[in-house]
């Protein structure tokens, strides 16, 4: 029997705005208008300042471990804006480097600080905001996205789920189970992988044998694309189109966004121990803020004066966010009882009223523990 090819595929790489700020007008058609580019540049700049202040809060002992978003703002900016323009009806299942996508869709900025300060109220999502709490375990949130998308399809809401994760997460079984589930059941999910080339300190070429991350989506029968993750135009267009496909065709879509974290993995990490500074410097030249500003300047839509005004605005805004986060009222002790059950079990009622474990009240054998 003769041989035949039973499967072949290709992965498209999409770049619309390059690192020099030059725009491919044909690809940019019907995407972002000039005022929207200005808006997103301002939001990325504010998010960058927020990121720097959060870093300083950690270093000064005012906050716990923090993962900087520095260098990865464009992917979440474009994706988040595509979601926002659909009315923020879609669900976002984030990792921890998508601050701007969350802010654009209703997450109060102080909530992220509260989360990293260890205050659980940072995970209390406001009513009407379709965002899940930040997922710290690697690769669990795509499962949540698949489940939410299943519910949206069943209820015919017309909404999708967008989940963000890193390249390292694609080596986790949870991610593959989520993709298989979404594909088999034809669910409206957009899988957005921020490939920053490092799974903490493990380089991409060591943690996976795949030539691209995007091809992992092909294995599950879904349209898969690779984009320049530092390009707001590419991110916006690809996610906008992916949401349309997901909702109208009940078809999950996989997007690999090529980017780079300019900071450490978290404030508990020192990337100088395993990264080549020359490569980091090369990526600094691809900074999404720099290329977007170059584009705006080429269109006579930005100036040093506007930049100074923006920086003053960012400082005032973020100072207010920090003040609200640090000034939040001390939680009541009873809160640990009041938000876990619809009806509190009798044993926990006794604990709440006595502020002691019920066992110390009921069993004399444990009396010595009180001493």
Image (cartoon, rainbow, N blue to C red):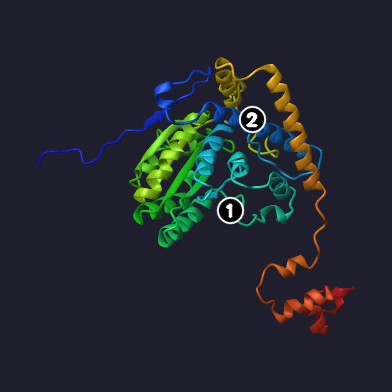
Residue 289 placement: quadrant: top right
Task: Say which residue label 2 marks.
Answer: 42
Residue 258 in the image, given as x and y percentages of width and height: 49, 31
Residue 11 placement: quadrant: top left
Residue 306 in the image, given as x and y percentages of width and height: 68, 22
**Other-residue count near label 1 (Cα within 10 Å), few / some / many at <14 / 14–19 / ≥20:** many
Q: Nearer the viewer, residue 44 or 54?
A: 44
Q: Residue furthest right?
A: 371
Quarter of the image that includes the N terminus: top left
Choose mark 1 or mark 2, whichever is in front.
2
Task: Say which residue label 1 marks.
Answer: 132
For residue 39, above or below residue 220: above
Determine if residue 78 is in view.
Answer: yes
Give the total of numbered labels.
2
Q: Determine whether the residue tagged by mark 2 lies in a helix, strand or loop.
A: helix
Quarter of the image that includes the C terminus: bottom right
**Other-residue count near label 2 (Cα within 10 Å), few / some / many at <14 / 14–19 / ≥20:** some
Rounded to the nearest angstrom, the CA distance separating label 1 from label 2 is: 25 Å
Contact, CB < 8 Å: mark 1 with mark 2? no
**Marking on residue 72:** none
């Amino acid at each position: 029997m003769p041989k035949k090819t039973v499967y072949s595929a290709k992965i498209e790489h999409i770049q619309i705005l390059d690192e020099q700020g030059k725009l491919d007008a044909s690809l940019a058609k019907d995407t972002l208008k000039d005022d929207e580019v200005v808006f997103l540049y301002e939001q990325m700049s504010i998010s960058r300042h927020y990121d720097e202040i959060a870093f300083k809060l950690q270093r000064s002992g005012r906050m716990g471990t923090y993962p900087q978003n520095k260098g990865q703002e464009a992917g979440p900016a474009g994706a988040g804006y595509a979601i926002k323009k659909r009315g923020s009806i879609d669900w976002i299942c984030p990792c921890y480097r998508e601050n701007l996508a969350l802010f654009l869709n209703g997450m109060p900025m102080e909530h992220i600080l509260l989360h990293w300060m260890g205050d659980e109220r940072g995970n209390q999502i406001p009513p009407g905001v379709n965002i899940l709490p930040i997922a710290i375990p690697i690769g669990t949130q795509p499962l949540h996205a698949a489940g939410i998308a299943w519910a949206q399809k069943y209820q015919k809401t017309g909404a999708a789920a967008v989940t963000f994760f890193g390249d390292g997460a694609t080596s986790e079984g949870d991610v593959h189970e989520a993709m298989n589930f979404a594909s088999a059941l034809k669910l409206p999910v957009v899988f957005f992988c921020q490939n920053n080339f490092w799974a903490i300190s493990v380089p991409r070429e060591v943690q996976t044998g795949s030539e691209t991350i995007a091809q992992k989506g092909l294995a599950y029968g879904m349209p898969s694309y690779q984009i320049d993750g530092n390009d707001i135009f590419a991110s916006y267009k690809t996610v906008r189109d992916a949401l349309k496909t997901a909702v109208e065709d009940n078809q999950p879509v996989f997007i690999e966004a090529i980017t780079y974290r300019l900071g450490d993995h978290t404030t508990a990490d020192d990337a100088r121990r395993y990264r080549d500074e020359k490569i980091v410097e090369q990526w600094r030249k691809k900074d999404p803020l720099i290329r977007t500003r170059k584009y705006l300047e080429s269109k006579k839509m930005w100036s040093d004066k506007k930049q100074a005004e923006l920086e003053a605005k960012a400082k005032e805004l973020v100072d207010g966010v920090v003040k609200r986060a640090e000034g939040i009222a001390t939680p009541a002790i009873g809160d640990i009882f009041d938000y876990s059950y619809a009806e509190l079990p009798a044993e926990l009622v006794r604990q709440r009223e006595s502020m002691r474990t019920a066992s110390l009240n009921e069993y004399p054998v444990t009396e010595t523990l009180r001493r």
